[in-house]
Each structure stands twice: as structure tokens, then as C-alpha cells.
Image: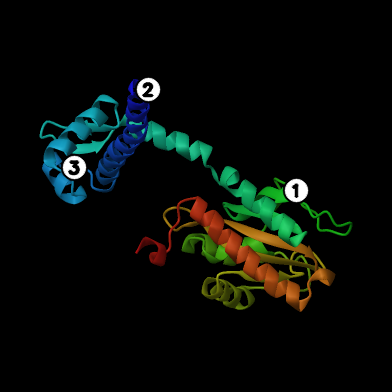
Amino acid sequence: MKKSSDVTQTTAVQTAAPEYGITALASALEVLNAVGEHPGLRARQLAELTGLTKSKVFRIVRTLEQSGYVTLDEGHACTLGSGAYLLGKRAEQQWSLSRAATPILDALAELTRENVHLVVRQGLHSLVVDVRVSPQPIRMFAQVGRVGPLHAGGTPKVLLAYAPEAVLEAVLSEPLSQYTGATPKGSGDLQPMLERIRRDGYHLAISDLDEDTFSIAAPVRDVQGQVIAALSVAGPLMRLTDDKRLDFVRLVVQQAQRLSGALGYRTNAQQS
């Protein structure tokens, strides 16, 4: 009997402890998030906001204060502390764009067997920050660190379409360098393309940066919804059949949205 009783008691402890721990942690995180979203609230207001009791919120706040995750002013109003700041910076470093993009670039390269590019805007130029090179013998040139224009190519024009107005004005105020016969020659060519990108959410560029090539690109957004990068599949134009074009557009948009989600971006539908 004693052995049976011991087993029963141990089982109870093993099942109850994790449940209690998760509940307590969830409550603390809820309060911490509330402080982050609504700085300056007091324990009573945080309790009303979270649905927790005032005494529980008070204990959580004091614990978070001791750990440096919140600070209390003389009126006991709560704001995020240095601990929360440092944790956020570490998270930012660990979940940088390149880190978050790695599995997505790998998946897109495997599905398409074409070059995959991750590109950001650097001033008035585009910059390749990560690539996956096609395993096929005929393929496009791809290199991390390649600097290009913003008015030609798939990812550059996506970045330009969502860039601040000052960037767009600066690009259009100078003559547009011509790389092929298909490169946009001025605002009359470029503006409708940018409007179409913002409407469709992707861009198909054909031979406007490199001859006989294609690039299908879509925007990548951060947690605030800002376009911080563009993702593309690119390759020789001779391999872009109608079926592949439709498939590649779907895949690029899908994976760009997946990367945006990994960076914290949520659509209105996801937030509701």
C-alpha cells in the first residue's frame, strides 16, 4: 500500500507542478505585455486590463521589478525596465532577418530549383544579403553583397515600390541607367510598374536588368508592417513556362508572407 500511495502522490506532483508553473508564467507574461503596450499604468489598471486580481498583478509587478523587467516610478506607474530592453535586443539579434530567412530560402530553393535571393534597400541601391544558387547547369549569376539599382530587376523594384516618398523622388530625379532594352526609361515607365506592385503584392521582371532572365519578387514586412526586404526566385527566361510562372508567383508570395510572419508581422485578419 505504501508503494502504491507513493506512486500516486508522485504522479500528482508531476502533473500539478507544470500546470501551476505554466499558469503563473502566462499571467506574468500577460502583465509584461500589458506594460509594454500601455506604459504608465498602475497595478489596479493592469488588473482591469488583464482580468487578473489586483493582488496577483501587484505580486507579479514586484517580481518583474526585482528582475529588472519593469520599473515603478514614485506613483507606482509601470514601464518596461532594462531587463526587458536587453531581452528584446537579444531576441532581435537571434531572430534577425537572415536567421529567420534561412529555412524559407532553403525551402523555396528546393521547390523551384532556381536562384533564390533575399535583398534589402541600402540608400538608393539594392543589396543582396543572402542567396541560394540553382543546382542546374544554366543559371543566373548570384552573389551575396551584390549592389544594384532600384529601378531594374524584381526585388529592387519591389523595394522601391514600398520605399519612402523621398527615396522614390531621388531615384526619379536622376536619369535611369539602362541595362537592357527592357529597363524602364523614366517615370512614365516606372510609376505604373510600382503601382501594380503595390496592388498585386508581387512583381515579375523580365530581362530588364540581365538579358534573357526573369525574377519574381514579393515584399517582406517587419512587425510594424514596414517592407524591409524582398524575396525572389530568378533564372533563365527559357525555363519560365506559363505553368511555372503561376507556380513561382504563388510560392514566392507564400514564402515572403511566411518570412514576414516569422519577423512578427500579422495581417488584420490574423490580429482579429
| Marks 1/3: CA–CA distance | 48 Å
The label number, if any, that marks residue 3 in the structure image? 2
Q: Nearer the viewer, mark 2 or mark 1?
A: 2
Q: Residue furthest top?
A: 2
Identify which residue is drawn at 37% across, 27% down: 7
Q: Residues within 10 Å of mark 2 (few under 14, many from 20)?
A: few
Amino acid type, label 2: Lys
The residue at the far front in this view is: 1
Residue 109 found in image quarter = bottom right
**Element carrying mark 1:** loop
1 and 3 marks in contact (CB < 8 Å): no
Q: Position of residue 132 (x, y in %)?
A: 73, 51
Question: In this rendering, would 34 be left or right of 267?
Answer: left
Give the mark, 2 or 1, whose residue is nearer the N terminus. 2
> Can residue 126 be spotted in the picture?
no
Q: Give the residue number, with chain letter if any, for mark 3.
A: 40
Kindly state the secondary structure of the residue where label 3 is placed: loop
Taking the spot 82% from the left edge, 69% from the top edge, the residue there is: 239
As rendered, which of 251 and 178 lies closer to the eye?
251
Relative to residue 78, is residue 10 depicted above or below? above
Q: Earlier in the sequence, mark 2 or mark 3?
A: 2
Are the residues at dot 2 and dot 3 in contact (C-beta closer than 8 Å)? no
- 82 left or right of 153 in image: left
Residue 195, image x and y in percent?
Answer: 54, 75
Residue type marked 3: Gly
- Of circles 2 and 3, the one toward us is 2
- Kindly identify the amino acid type of the residue bearing the numbered disc 1: Gln
**Local SS, label 2:** helix
Q: Which residue lies at the image location 45% right of the left edge and 52% below the top edge?
A: 264
Which residue is rendered at x = 44% and y = 35% of the image?
89
Identify the residue under disc 1. Answer: 143
